[in-house]
């Protein structure tokens, strides 16, 4: 990545795990105490509701989530999402997380659904399915 951020070994391992294994569907990243270093904050298997509830109300996060849904024809589908969670109470960190978000978009070039959410209702399941569609 040609950016002023770096991914920690834990975040790289978590993102690799997400891609290679089916046992997890969510990785959240946050900035560490070291400036410019993104670390894995959470790695696990969350339902949509659990994902929304797990996001902090006052701190930003970068989230890579595999959304499972059914197509209108009934076919099961999965789509990788890159979510920039930026609640109003975390706005003082927005510039730093924007740099990290842009770097992750470059690093995860095969993830085509990117979105910024400032409120939980912006992560409503049907909206995410429509974006991933």
Image (tube, rainbow, N blue to C red):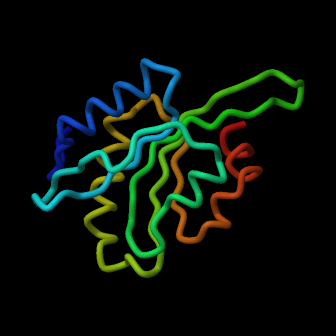
In the rendered image, the vertical position of residue 35 relative to residue 46, given as above or below: below
Residue 71, image quadrant: top right
Q: Nearer the viewer, residue 112 or 43?
A: 43
Residue 131 or residue 69, whichever sits in front: 69
Q: Position of residue 80 (x, y in %)?
A: 54, 35
Where, quadrant-wise, is the C terminus in this rendering?
A: top right
Q: Nearer the viewer, residue 92 or 52?
A: 52
Q: Residue furthest top?
A: 20
Instruction: Tell me if 46 is positioned left or right of 56 in this view.
Output: right
Q: Give me the residue at 10% from left, 58% from top.
A: 34
Q: Quadrant of the N terminus?
A: top left
**Residue 112 sits above or below residue 61 on the image:** above
| Horizontal side, residue 103 vs residue 26: left or right | left
Looking at the image, the residue that sits furthest to the left is 34
Seen at 35% across and 53% down, the residue is 101
Q: Measuring 27% from the left and 39% from the top, which residue is drawn there?
A: 11
Residue 87: percent from left, percent from top: 47, 73
Which x, y percent locates residue 76?
A: 76, 23
Q: Is residue 39 above or below residue 86?
A: above
Q: Is residue 32 above or below residue 119?
A: above
How many marks on residues? 0
Q: Is residue 40 left or right of residue 112?
A: left
Q: Name the side, left or right, on which 6 lies relative to 117.
A: left
Image location (x, y in percent) of residue 77: 70, 26
């Amino acid at each position: 990545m040609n950016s002023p951020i770096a991914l920690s070994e834990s975040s790289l391992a978590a993102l690799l795990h997400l891609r290679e294994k089916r046992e997890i569907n969510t990785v959240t990243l946050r900035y560490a105490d070291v400036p410019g270093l993104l670390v894995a904050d959470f790695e696990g298997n969350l339902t949509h509701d659990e994902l929304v509830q797990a996001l902090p109300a006052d701190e930003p996060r970068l989230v890579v989530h595999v959304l499972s849904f059914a197509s209108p024809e009934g076919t099961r589908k999965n789509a990788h999402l890159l979510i920039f969670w930026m609640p109003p109470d975390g706005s003082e960190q927005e510039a730093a997380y924007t740099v990290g978000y842009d770097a992750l978009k470059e690093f995860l070039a095969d993830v085509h659904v990117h979105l910024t959410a400032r409120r939980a209702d912006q992560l409503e399941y049907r909206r995410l399915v429509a974006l991933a569609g």
